[in-house]
Amino acid sequence: MDKERLDNDRLDDALAMLKKKGGRITPTRRAVIQILISESTHLSAEDLAKRIQHRLPDVHISTIYRTLDALEAVGVVDHVHLGHGRAIYHLSSDIHQHLVCEVCSSVTEVPESFFATLKGELQETFGFTMRAHHFAVIGRCRNCAVTVRSEIS
Amino acid sequence: MDKERLDNDRLDDALAMLKKKGGRITPTRRAVIQILISESTHLSAEDLAKRIQHRLPDVHISTIYRTLDALEAVGVVDHVHLGHGRAIYHLSSDIHQHLVCEVCSSVTEVPESFFATLKGELQETFGFTMRAHHFAVIGRCRNCAVTVRSEIS
DNA sequence: ATCTTTGCAAACTTTTTGCACCAAT
DNA sequence: ATTGGTGCAAAAAGTTTGCAAAGAT
């Protein structure tokens, strides 16, 4: 119920994980984690940079990338490719699939459980262990179902 | 049976499609299609450039990109993102999913039919029409199942 | 003759890296 | 005091674009 309490716990957990693996806690790292906790939207490195630079104007985007790498190495965040070269980042604890509409670019989140059957079949047939959420699923959302394709490429 | 015959037919079909939509047939375009027909491997723009430059040394990579765009616009080819920014291209008629191992980068092809159930469910639940093959599925192949992750990112 | 495609060089976008300085432990 | 993190600028990597010349119809 107490959302703020829960968010703080998540922040502490993430920082503890970072620390446990020899990482240091810095204002930028704290800010990145906080933003990822509070905005569960789909944030690119640039999105994160913009948000952080409100409070810490001198944070360079290369630091954001290094921070994200560090957090990823430690298991706190994960990234997903949505299209082109652009990647988005989210907390590892928020695992879900992304359905991206190739027309309007809208993103629909789908619980990973949805992919359980497929995952089992790929495992059984190919011995392949799917880490599904690493790429978005591309297609057409309900609204754009009949339009001409072109967007995400 | 007569593979060469079939390949020629595919080439002719592709060229006809291109022509029908107002595109012109050039040596580069012919070569791109031929390569995509004969090597059903997973070719990036650079791979294609290298192969083509054997025969047509002056073909510039930007031409390859424009050719691929043109062929894609006309429905002859499709591209898939395997990781990072890199995309690979194949004939639209060769629709399949790619399972990419995040450790050894090996690629396993899976017939699209495998994804039919999931596709149906996404359609029903979210009204989302999946064009699955646009992104690879990331995970671990049989051999790398237990190793530490790190590669594809 | 017309209008598309090409080659080249240069721009762009996203991400990575080298290095000297700074800060967390 | 150490060692890891940061800012900056510059380099990658992959793809796109403007333009004048060449080529397909």
Image: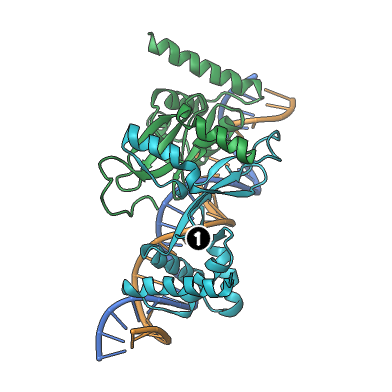
Chain colours: A cyan, B green, C orange, D blue
Residue A124 shows up from this direction? yes
Q: Dot 1, how many residues are within 10 Å of its Cα: few (below 14), some (14-19), or many (20+)?
A: many
Q: Is residue D2 depicted above or below D8 in this figure?
A: below
Q: Is residue D2 depicted above or below A16 in this figure?
A: below
Task: Name the chain under label 1.
Answer: A
What SS does tag 1 mark? strand
Q: Is residue C14 depicted above or below A122 in this figure?
A: below
Indicate the amino acid at tag 1. Answer: His
Rendering quarter of residue C25: bottom left
Q: Pick the quarter of the image with the N terminus of chain A.
A: bottom right
- Provide residue B53's location: percent of width, then percent of height: 40, 33
Kindly identify the residue that appears in the image at 37 percent across and 78 percent down.
Answer: A24
* Horizontal side of residue A105 vs B133, given as left or right: right
- Provide residue A103's location: percent of width, then percent of height: 66, 42
Kindly identify the residue that appears in the image at 54 percent across and 75 percent down.
Answer: A5
Residue B49 shows up from this direction? no
Q: Which residue is mark 1?
A: A90
- Provide residue B148's location: percent of width, then percent of height: 28, 54
Q: Pick the quarter of the image with the C terminus of chain A.
A: top right
A14 or B54, which lies in front? A14
D15 or A90, which lies in front? A90
* Horizontal side of residue B148 vs A37, given as left or right: left
- Provide residue B151's location: percent of width, then percent of height: 34, 52
